[in-house]
Image (spheres, rainbow, N blue to C red):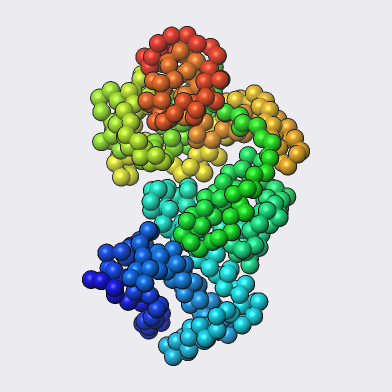
Amino acid sequence: MNNVPIRMRVVYAGNRIDFSTGYRIDVAKWDTEKQRVKNGCSNKLKQSASEINTDLLTYYADIQAIFKEFEVQNRVPTPEQLKEAFSNKYKQPQPESKSEREELSKVLFNAAFDEFIKECGAQNSWGDATYGKFAALKNHLTDFDENLSFEVLDETKLMAYLGYLRDVVDMRNNTLEKQISYLKWFLRWSVKKGYNNNIAFETFKPKLKYIQKKVIFLTWKELNRLREYVIPDTKKYLERVRDVFLFCCFTGLRYSDVYNLKRSDVKDDRIEITTIKTADSLIIELNNHSKTILDKYKGIAFENDKVLPVISNQKMNDYLKELAELAEINEPVRETYYKGNERIDVVTPKYALLGTHAGRRTFICNALSLGIPAQVVMKWTGHSDYKAMKPYVDIADDIKASAMDKFNRL
């Protein structure tokens, strides 16, 4: 079908109202899933996808603003009132006042952010953690300035936002760098979509001092101390936590992957999985230590046919710190970081820094220190490039000899 009208449908409180957008498009050029004109297309009047989609988002923002006005009055608009309010917005080329323009810009910014999360999340197969990062970003932006819009994000405003994250949210420079990169991702997307023509962010490149975060892992001596520690009868709940953590230390699995590990993933001498975070297909050979842990739970049934008794990540982190403190994994660890230009040094006992991810780091660091080539370790861990392995390689200075069976000699 060619040159069909684009209508906007609003459904609420049992009402269904169709609005004309004034645009037409060929059906083949319409993205049904995104409810937008496909990028790079135009209609018979040579109106581009960018132009049409920007107006569609504006109409959506208008409807949101109208409902908000009625909500403030504790009223639900009738279909007639909604039509009239929407129509009134387009009797003039611009909103009637500065406050109305600011309100519309704010709603447009928020609507664009929601669309960005939905679209990029689907395109890039985001996991819960990534969705959480961008939800946090949106919250930070709203807390910083609830009237934020594309137009005001110049270098001065961006610098003020950076200061807010540093001084109010109490972020370190390493985290600030990530937050700015997330924001720039959204702003580049909004420019590409035609929702934003302010590109001041492209030249915003603050110089932030930061030091590579220290890799927290257990040495062989510490790992054996943790493994051999006799857990008191009053704290037997720590035994399963230790087993799961040790399994990560001897396989390199992330928490998310050991949590989802099913009996069908375990073969005679290996594990075959598709990782949760990166969707990598991995084959990880088992060694004597990882086999012993699997054998311990072989005859015990767990929910969803899981292999091991894995509890929530937060609980496991808490218990792991408790276990490591009891086992006297208390080497002082000095961490250095920057907040603005201020250098801060903190010394913490290692047990207080341990979390589930330390299991994977322990596997990598100790495998490299045994002399196992980084390329082999990367096959087990799923790291895609050597750059990601570099921090671990720098740590592994006790090089000895060959491959995975070396775990069996310890």
Residue sticking out furthest to the right: 342
- Foreground residue, 196 or 286? 196
Position of the N terminus, as image quadrant, is: bottom left
- Relative side of 335 to 33, left or right: right
Residue sticking out furthest to the top: 400
- Foreground residue, 303 or 55? 55
Q: Position of residue 132 (x, y in %)?
A: 50, 52
- Relative side of 128 to 161, left or right: left
Mark yes or no: residue 172 visible.
no
Above or below, 361 against 69 in this view is: above
- What residue do we see at 55% from left, 25% from top? 391
Above or below, 307 against 129 in this view is: above
- Foreground residue, 248 or 86? 86
- Foreground residue, 153 or 340? 153
- What residue do we see at 68% from left, 28% from top? 334
- What residue do we see at 44% from left, 20% from top? 374
Q: Position of residue 212 (x, y in %)?
A: 61, 31
Q: Position of residue 370 (x, y in %)?
A: 46, 13
Q: Position of residue 37 (x, y in %)?
A: 36, 65
Position of the C terminus, as image quadrant, is: top left
* Residue 243 figure quarter: top left
